[in-house]
């Protein structure tokens, strides 16, 4: 019994032993850390790719030079213009059309040619039965020279924001028609 007592006494006074890492723990930590590092290398660029366009500053109110003011009459005229677009990292050019005229008060009015019924393109004076109106050849929608809807279409034609500068007309974004009530 005295022998056991000495062993117990000896164990109580031993300095604490440092717990050593086993080979299995070392490999687990090493492989886990390397896997996390590689996963971060794959996931972080994907997150950056998805979030970066949201963080970019947008060019608010970008206007496009379309036509000289001197060429505009009271009769609507069709003008085509290019708009540079940036969709994420994809840059392209869109060909757009506007019907532009001077109103009775001398203001410039630029209407979108897209019919509010089903999205076909309207034309000015393209139906002899309805002179001096925009007419949609798809389903017969008709609009006044200000873009007010007369038949079929539920809303008036949209309009472009317009800016006059140095004798030129610049068109901006498409907005709801504010000329007609």
Image: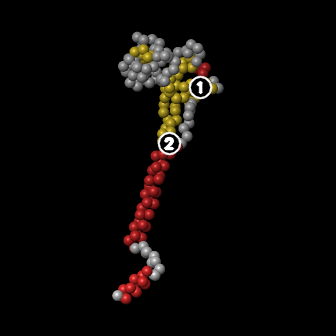
Circle 1 is placed at which residue position?
163
Q: Name the residue: 47% across, 53% down.
A: 44
Q: CA distance from mark 2 to mark 1?
A: 28 Å
Labels 2 and 1 touching (C-beta < 8 A): no
| Horizontal relation, residue 140 to residue 104: left or right | left
Residue 13 at least partly seen: yes
Other-residue count near label 1 (Cα within 10 Å), few / some / many at <14 / 14–19 / ≥20: some
Q: Nearer the viewer, residue 112 or 43?
A: 43
Other-residue count near label 2 (Cα within 10 Å), few / some / many at <14 / 14–19 / ≥20: few
Q: Residue 108, how many percent across, how many down? A: 57, 20
Query: Element type at marker 2?
Result: helix
Q: Residue 128, how many percent across, how many down? A: 42, 12
Q: Which mark is residue 54?
A: 2
> Is 53 rendered above or below residue 13?
above
| Horizontal relation, residue 2 to residue 76: left or right | left
Q: Name the residue: 43% across, 67% down.
A: 30
Q: Nearer the viewer, residue 137 or 46?
A: 46
Q: Quadrant of residue 120?
A: top left
Query: Element type at marker 1?
Result: strand
């Amino acid at each position: 019994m005295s022998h056991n007592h000495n062993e117990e006494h000896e164990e109580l006074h031993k300095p604490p032993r440092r717990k050593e890492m086993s080979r299995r723990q070392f490999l687990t930590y090493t492989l886990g850390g390397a896997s996390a590092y590689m996963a971060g290398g794959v996931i972080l660029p994907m997150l950056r790719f998805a979030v970066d366009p949201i963080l970019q500053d947008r060019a608010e109110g970008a206007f496009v030079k379309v036509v000289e003011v001197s060429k505009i009459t009271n009769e609507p005229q069709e003008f085509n213009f290019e708009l540079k677009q940036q969709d994420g990292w994809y840059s392209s050019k869109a060909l757009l059309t506007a019907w532009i005229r001077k109103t009775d008060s001398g203001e410039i009015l630029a209407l979108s040619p897209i019919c509010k019924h089903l999205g076909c393109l309207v034309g000015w004076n393209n139906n002899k039965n309805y002179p001096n109106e925009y007419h949609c050849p798809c389903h017969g929608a008709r609009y006044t020279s200000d873009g007010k809807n007369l038949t079929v279409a539920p809303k008036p034609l949209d309009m472009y924001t317009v800016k006059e500068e140095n004798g030129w007309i610049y068109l901006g974004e498409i907005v709801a028609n504010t000329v007609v009530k």
